[in-house]
Image: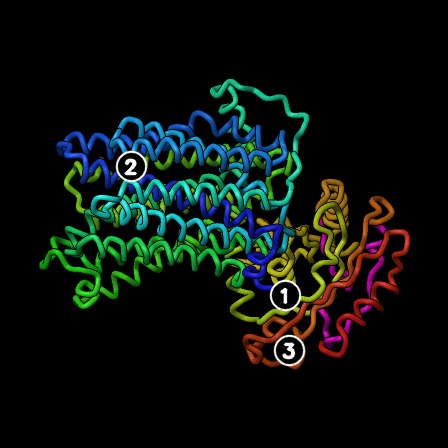
């Protein structure tokens, strides 16, 4: 089922439109306020600069003050009640904004800006914590992609509409007030259709001290190192995006020689690119939380960010170009493509990180982890503003700032990937599997979404563990012969995936015993363990007799056993068919069509070695 089918489901659609309308109103109000202050109140340049620079700081301030409290509320209480209260608050804020717009009261509008920041702060932890409650694990990446796409487009349309409506001669403030009020009321009405989302920690004792609770929330966020580094990755996305967007007016006017329509065009290209990248995550990742896309996105941010610098730099020759005239200039399509691909890379980068945090963080802590993420995001946004202002004060032009942040992205990404090599491991796995194979998967619903289980599968090629890693939605601990475990390059992948090397009793009894201890510990921790009971690669394409190691494991730790079978690998790259015939193991079946078929779990008391072997043979069928 396509991720777009979620837009027709009550589980998702009302929430999607509620958050999209909120994002629209945030940006419509903010840009309308800037237009009013900058062009219609007759203020001096210094006063305008003071308001326009103070406004972003005022909007972001509630994220520092109230994110921790918002995370607590989202876990202690039913989420849809909070959503509706937030939307009523938005209606009240827009009513105050209407007074401010009509009377041209800038100070009152700044108060509303703070209130809208508070609105976003309270809604933030719910926005991402509600998705794992409403969606199945297989829908999580697609749902996140839709939310990111909807948010980007809502932000873009809100900015354009807010600015354009305020500039309507003689009626701008009234029209903006009516539109933002109507959107706020519409958001509340839609929110009433959001299905209930029960409290995940109803016994939580609220701490109203924002400082001590902020420290506690950040400690919770840092408790899982992988989650914390994913949060750092998300925050870097906001740093990179803030630097990019903040320089767009200067870049448009000074480097591209464009007018306001060109500024809208480049912002549109970036926003649409981000939305497309977000939507591609489900298709490319096969409906899994594929964090292997994160290095790909990071690579794109640097490559296209650097190329944006070289595509056009220095002062523009022509000035005041509209968007059509700009596109007619030499090299303009390269600039447009770079901006769109930077956005696409950003979508590929950030959506898997959000889905990873949602899937990895404990459900009863997720809202507070998201709150911690929002605090770090806010900090990085502030630092990004300082970064851009500082480099601008040193005399760097917009394209040089873009080059600086693109190169800095290399260092930040390397830092994160060194701390969490799982990102790189999944990237290598994704590239290898999708380069050599076209994989079809059937029956993944039979793999338990949580809790321990043993997966048993036939063993055809050296790539089998990678194929399974790339296909399973849950991480699994693979038990493999120590010689395969020690293969160059793949050893990094297997070590990072916490594979368990094993040897025969005659080869190395100590390694065998260590393997059984590691398997039992993994199952005790609620993990999946994948075995190849044949004890080695097939030498003739057929399924070899299963060894009794599974029974030894079940005697100590009774868990369900899930039969699986790989089809179509015999004769593909890295199977033994060619070596058996004394020919070079060449890629005669490059991009081979292979299948993974998964059957229903077998209760531990019913497991028989002969029965497992027979079932795997049946699943594999004639397609060796």
Identify the residue at horizontal 82%, vertical 54% (top origin): 550
Task: From this view, report whether residue 577 is shown above or below residue 278.
Answer: below
Q: Nearer the viewer, mark 2 or mark 1?
A: 2
Question: Residue 385 shows which numbered tag?
Answer: 2
What kind of secondary structure does the magenta stretch mostly adopt? loop
Q: Which residue is mark 1?
A: 462
User: Alpha-carbon distance for marks 2 and 1?
Assistant: 49 Å
Identify the residue at horizontal 30%, vertical 41% (top origin): 174
Q: Quadrant of residue 26?
A: top left
Question: On the picture, is 483 further left or further right than 242?
Answer: right
Question: Residue 571 shows which numbered tag?
Answer: 3
| Residue 190 screen position, x and y as percent | 53, 46
Q: Nearer the viewer, mark 3 or mark 2?
A: 2
Identify the residue at horizontal 19%, vertical 47% (top origin): 250
User: Alpha-carbon distance for marks 3 and 1?
Assistant: 12 Å
- Disc 1, SS: loop
Q: Quadrant of residue 198?
A: top right
């Amino acid at each position: 089922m396509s991720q777009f089918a979620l837009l027709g489901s009550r589980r998702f659609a009302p929430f999607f439109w509620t958050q999209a309308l909120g994002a629209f109103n945030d940006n419509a109000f903010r840009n309308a306020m800037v237009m009013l202050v900058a062009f219609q109140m007759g203020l001096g340049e210094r006063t305008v600069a003071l308001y326009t620079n103070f406004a972003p700081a005022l909007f972001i301030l509630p994220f520092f003050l109230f994110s921790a409290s918002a995370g607590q509320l989202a876990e202690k209480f039913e989420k849809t009640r909070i959503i509706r209260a937030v939307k009523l608050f938005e209606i009240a804020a827009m009513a105050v904004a209407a007074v401010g717009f009509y009377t041209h009261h800038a100070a009152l509008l700044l108060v509303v800006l703070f209130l809208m920041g508070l609105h976003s702060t309270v809604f933030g932890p719910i926005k991402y914590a509600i998705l794992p409650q409403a969606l199945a694990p297989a829908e999580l990446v697609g749902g996140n992609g839709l939310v990111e796409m909807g948010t980007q487009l809502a932000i873009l349309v809100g900015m354009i509409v807010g600015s354009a409506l305020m500039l309507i001669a003689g009626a701008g403030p009234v029209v903006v007030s009516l539109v933002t009020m109507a959107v706020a009321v519409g958001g509340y009405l839609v929110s009433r259709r959001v299905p209930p989302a029960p409290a995940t920690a109803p016994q939580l004792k609220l701490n109203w001290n924002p400082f001590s609770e902020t420290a506690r929330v950040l400690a919770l966020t840092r408790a899982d190192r992988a989650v914390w580094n994913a949060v750092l990755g998300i925050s870097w996305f906001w740093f990179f995006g803030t630097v990019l967007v903040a320089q767009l007016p200067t870049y448009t006017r000074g480097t591209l020689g464009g007018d306001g329509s060109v500024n809208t065009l480049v912002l549109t290209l970036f926003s649409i690119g981000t939305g497309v990248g977000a939507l591609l995550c489900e298709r490319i990742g096969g409906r899994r939380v594929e964090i292997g896309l994160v290095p790909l996105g990071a690579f794109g941010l640097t490559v296209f960010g650097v190329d944006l610098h070289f595509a056009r730099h220095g002062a523009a020759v022509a000035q005041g170009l509209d968007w059509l005239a700009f596109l007619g200039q030499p090299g303009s399509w390269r600039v447009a493509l770079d901006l769109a691909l930077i956005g696409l890379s950003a979508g590929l980068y950030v959506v898997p990180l959000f889905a990873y945090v949602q899937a990895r963080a404990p459900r009863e802590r997720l809202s507070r982890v998201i709150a911690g993420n929002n605090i770090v995001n806010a900090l990085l946004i502030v630092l990004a503003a300082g970064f851009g202002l500082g480099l601008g004060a040193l005399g760097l032009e917009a394209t040089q700032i873009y080059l600086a942040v693109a190169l800095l992205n290399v260092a930040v990404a390397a830092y994160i990937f060194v701390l969490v090599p799982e990102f790189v491991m999944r990237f290598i796995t994704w590239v290898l599997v999708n380069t050599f194979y076209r994989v079809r998967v059937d029956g993944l619903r039979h793999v338990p979404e949580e809790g321990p289980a043993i997966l048993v599968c036939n063993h055809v090629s050296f790539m089998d563990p990678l194929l399974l890693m790339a296909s399973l939605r849950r991480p699994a601990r693979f038990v493999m012969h120590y010689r395969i475990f020690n293969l160059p390059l793949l050893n990094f992948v297997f070590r990072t995936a916490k594979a368990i090397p094993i040897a025969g009793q005659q080869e190395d009894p100590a390694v065998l015993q260590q393997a059984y201890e590691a398997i039992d510990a993994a199952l005790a921790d609620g993990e999946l363990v994948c075995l190849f009971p044949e004890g080695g690669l097939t030498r003739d394409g057929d399924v070899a007799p299963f060894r009794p190691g599974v029974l030894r494991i079940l005697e100590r730790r009774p868990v369900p056993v899930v039969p699986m079978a790989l089809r179509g690998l015999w004769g593909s790259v890295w199977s033994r068919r060619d070596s058996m015939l004394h020919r070079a193991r060449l890629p005669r079946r490059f991009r081979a069509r292979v299948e993974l078929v998964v059957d229903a779990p077998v209760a531990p008391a019913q497991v028989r070695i002969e029965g497992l072997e027979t079932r795997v043979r049946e699943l594999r069928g004639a397609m060796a």
